[in-house]
Image (cartoon, helix red, strand yellow):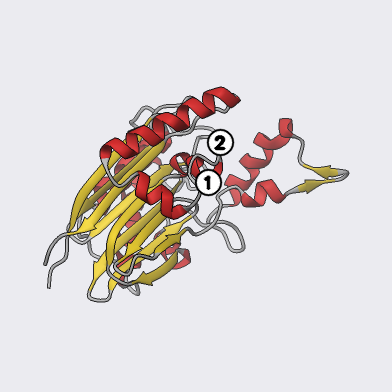
Amino acid sequence: MTYSWEIRARVQFEGDAHVQEDTCGFAGDTAWVVDGATTLLEPLGLPAASDPQWLAQTLSVLLAQPLPAPEGFVGVRARLASALAGVDAIGMAMVGQERVRFPSAAVSVVRLNEDGVEVASLADCRVLVRLEDGRTELVMAQDADAAVDAATVPGGPVDPQDRLLVLGKDRERRNTPGNLWVARREPEAADHAHVVQLPRPALMVLATDGAWRAVDLGLVASPAEFLDRVATPLGALELMVELRREQGRIGEVADDATILALVPAAK
């Protein structure tokens, strides 16, 4: 049996600090959202407006293709691993073995199957699923900067002026044992993805953390309300405009914001 998605809304807002480094899409039974991590280490100069933009766009193209999966991966992990293997092959031709300075991203990938929908996430993109019984499920792996926010130095928390340095050190440790795993060029990152199997969705929304600021800032009261607000193009646009106005009011630098709302196609 074949499965596929139908689109309900797709909205992307570029942030204040850099070019658009989010992507999203769907093909066949698979859908995804990618949030490129802002460059903190010395850039490699990949062929795009920024290294994270290159990774997000390249990963999106590869996720749209049913590539052979590396040995040992099945289901949604296989789709993620095959795309990362593709990034690795392209990266090898462009920058050789370089990994630490290679761009990275948060990503969520979902696949429809006979039991419903399988979700795989690395870092802090959000997947919201409205089940056919009306319940709303929220899936996220972990906050990408949680370790930095929890870091301490003698005398107390990290001073804000030192945070960029700490963030840079955190980036250097990613995709190593005991540290945060993200989408970069290592297929084995798929082994570290947070994977959840859920029943068949009536509606699904994938969102980057920039869009999720609408929840963080209290513009919507809950994940269920966020899903309701962004289920149509007009609703998603209105909420993102509200978010940008609130961020302007409080002086917050806005991040890229991406929302993709989908429903399973009729069988």
Q: Which residue is mark 2?
A: 41
Establish if 92 lies above or below 40.
below
Whether residue 117 sits left or right of residue 255 in the image: it is left
Q: Secondary structure at mark 1?
A: loop
Q: Residue at x 22, y 75 (%)?
A: 114
Residue 31: x percent and y percent?
27, 55
Residue 29: x percent and y percent?
20, 61
Residue 156: x percent and y percent?
84, 44
Where, by quadrant of the figure, is residue 198 drawn? bottom left
Q: Residues within 10 Å of mark 1 (few under 14, many from 20)?
A: some
Instruction: Determine whether label 2 and label 1 are within 8 Å by CB.
Output: yes
Where, by quadrant of the figure, is residue 166 drawn? top right
Q: Secondary structure at mark 2?
A: loop
Q: Amino acid at mark 1?
A: Val
Taking depth in this image into account, of 197 and 164 the one nearest to the observer is 197
Where, by quadrant of the figure, is residue 265 drawn? bottom left
Q: Residue at x 40, y 27 (%)?
A: 19
Establish if 21 lies above or below 198.
above
Q: Which residue is mark 1?
A: 100
Residue situated furthest right in the rendering: 155
- What is the spatial separation of the Cα atoms under label 2 and label 1, in whole angstroms? 9 Å
Pick the quarter of the image with the C terminus.
Answer: bottom left
* Res. 10 in view: yes
* Res. 17 in view: no
Q: Residue at x 13, y 68 (%)?
A: 2
